[in-house]
Image (tube, helix red, strand yellow):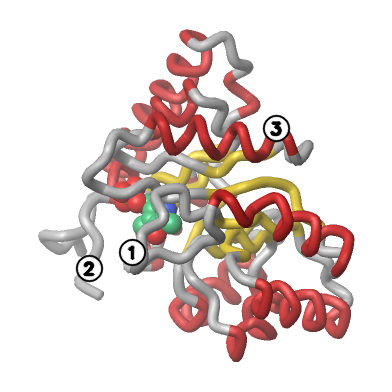
Amino acid sequence: MDTASSSSTSDIADNFEEITGRIHKAAETWARVPGDVDLIAVSKRQPVEAIEVALSLGHRHFGENRVQEAQEKWPDLKARYPDIELHLIGPLQTNKAKDAVALFDVIQTVDRPKLARVLAKEMTAAGRHLPVYIQVNTGKEEQKAGIFPEDADNFIIECREGLGLNVIGLMCIPPVEEQPAPHFALLGKIAARNNLARLSMGMSADFETAVQFGATSVRVGTALFGARSAP
Ligand SMILES: *Cc1c(COP(=O)(O)O)cnc(C)c1O
């Protein structure tokens, strides 16, 4: 049964087609290879039924922002669809690091030295050396997670060389009240000078701009699944 806040099966199917088409178009416009931009469907605070629709369409890459919510929704789905790739895109507390390493396939939000150390330890203990992104607080917002841009180079070196983390790229969430383009450009610059190939940036409102500035993953929630339930 549909509720007012969740989209119907056909809406979700239409949305996937539309968003995928817009990603391809943006990629072509900016002389990028469409297949180089990965769509991560952000399913936080969406019901499992909505995720099932995406899975039935063949979609396999998803993002969740809370460990506990993901633990309630994903173990069954992952058992049924072993090729699911689940990304943690929200802040991670160190006491949840072990659970996160057990469930997720990619951790996008490595944002501070203590978390990096705990993740390295838990990955070694679990024998799961997951790819990770470093989250950069490009807008230097106090309430937002992420390493400050001026500290990013040293932190990346520490994560890779000091801790042996498999750092594959950078992630950012620009300030809501600002144009995202300068933030995407800054993230791209930091990645380039650190030889990092992947950029996770762009959400429902700005994923085309993110593609313009080199995003290799865009994280789209509402534009695919409709409005989320209240937190
Ligand atoms: C919720 C969330 C998204 C998706 O946002 P939409 O505006 O719904 O597309 C993307 N990235 C992060 C980190 C999020 O928390």
In the image, 10: left or right of 96? Answer: left
In this rendered view, identify the residue nearer to me: 41 or 3: 41
Q: In which quarter of the image is the N terminus?
A: bottom left
Task: Find disc 1 in the rendering and name its residue.
Answer: 46
Upstream in sequence: badge 3 or badge 2: 3
Q: Position of residue 202 (x, y in %)?
A: 43, 39
- Residue at the spot 88% in from the left edge and 60% down from the top edge: 161
Single out the mark in the foreground, 3 or 2.
3
Q: In which quarter of the image is the C terminus?
A: bottom left
Is the shortest distance between ligand 1 and the CB of mark 3 under 8 Å? no
Q: Where is residue 162 in the image (x, y as percent from the top left)?
A: 87, 67
Task: Find disc 2 in the rendering and name its residue.
Answer: 229
Residue 184 visible? The answer is: yes
The three-letter amino acid code for the residue at tag 1 is Gln
Image height of 213 relative to 77, above or below: above
The three-letter amino acid code for the residue at tag 3 is Ala
Would you say the residues marked 2 and 1 are in contact, meaning their CB atoms lie under 8 Å apart? Answer: yes
In this rendered view, identify the residue nearer to me: 3 or 104: 104
